[in-house]
Amino acid sequence: MILIEKCPVCLSNKIKFSFKNKDRITNVKGEFNLWNCSKCNAYFINPTLSKIELFDFYPNIYYSFSKYDKTNIVRKFELWYLKNIMTRKDTINYHFTKIINPILTSTKVIKKRYIPFIKEGKLLDIGCGSGDFIDKMKYMGMIVEGVDPFAKKDSLNNVKIHCVELEKAHLKNKDFDVITLNHVLEHTQNPHVIFSKVKRILKDKGIFVIGVPNSNSIFSKIFKEYWIHWDTPRHVIMHNINTLNYLAKIHGFKIISTRFVSDTKVINNAILNILKEKKRLSFLKNIIMSDVIAMLLWPFYKSINLIFRSGDHLEIIMTKNIKGES
């Protein structure tokens, strides 16, 4: 373990201990200190774990490695909807999807994740996990590749997977139209390395899409260490709008869109974590985590996003800040 003396994002030395936490998802033993930077408000594990130490906290049961069933009826509908509805650009379809998408995402028929579709464009998904997303983007008509050091094999359905960390992957300069980094940056000990590499391999007019848990969300403050998205110690740095604004500016990116999304089961998971600690689960677990309760709470989560712009997930779309552009 290595003690950090400066913020790993903005390099400020105005950092202090915030609270202790533990692994509440895979239940690997250990307790970890989270520190906070008063300048950019990043939270980070300190002392930080080495890459070898972190490896033990990524068992096969971790959610990003879960397999998906391509023969599932819901999955087949999602693929059809993405290819035949989401890729259309006409006005009627635009208004239709504005109405129907929230219903489909709240019922988990389609994922909340932004779809950066460019017909026959080239996409790189950093931290591709089981390959669910890149498989969908390939089905929609994009040329796709993935990068993930924890990937089990170097190809998935004839899609190339680089089974190494991004900085070690052999990728051409200015080769990708779209690069996605969905819930990966928080697992990265040095975000500056990621941004530097992305800037090099992204085309000048390419799109860089980042999704992270929002450490400034209302529920992270209400539930504190029980908030599910701390995901200690795998989330080594927790980001917010300030940290991403800083990284974008330092590395020459321009933010063109910001979106907050709430997890429809974040309250359920927090209550479950509290009950686990008090050893009072039994029959309550299935009730608390039911889709019915999540659906009932959906309007409340939606209002949090609209009114406070403080959802549990933050999604930002960037482009390169080309010289001569304002």
Image: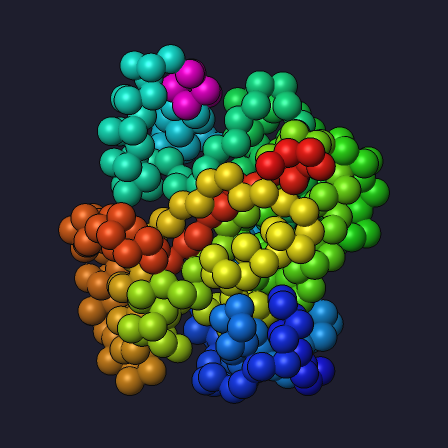
Q: In this view, does 326 lie above or below 219?
A: above
Residue visible at 48% across and 79% down in the picture: 22
Q: In this view, does 253 lie above or below 50?
A: above
Q: Which residue lies furthest to the left in this view?
A: 296
Q: How many marks?
A: 0
Residue 47 sits in quarter = bottom right
Q: In this view, does 139 lie above or below 31?
A: above
Quadrant location, the C terminus: top right
Residue visible at 31% across and 32% down in the picture: 101
Residue visible at 29% across and 73% down in the picture: 222
Along the line of sight, which residue is nearer the eye, 240 or 140? 240
Residue visible at 30% across and 78% down in the picture: 274
Q: Does 196 sit left or right of 257 as displayed?
A: right
User: What residue span does the magenta drawing correspond to?
Assistant: 83-89
| Residue 117 shows in the view | yes
Q: Does 285 sit left or right of 310 as displayed?
A: left
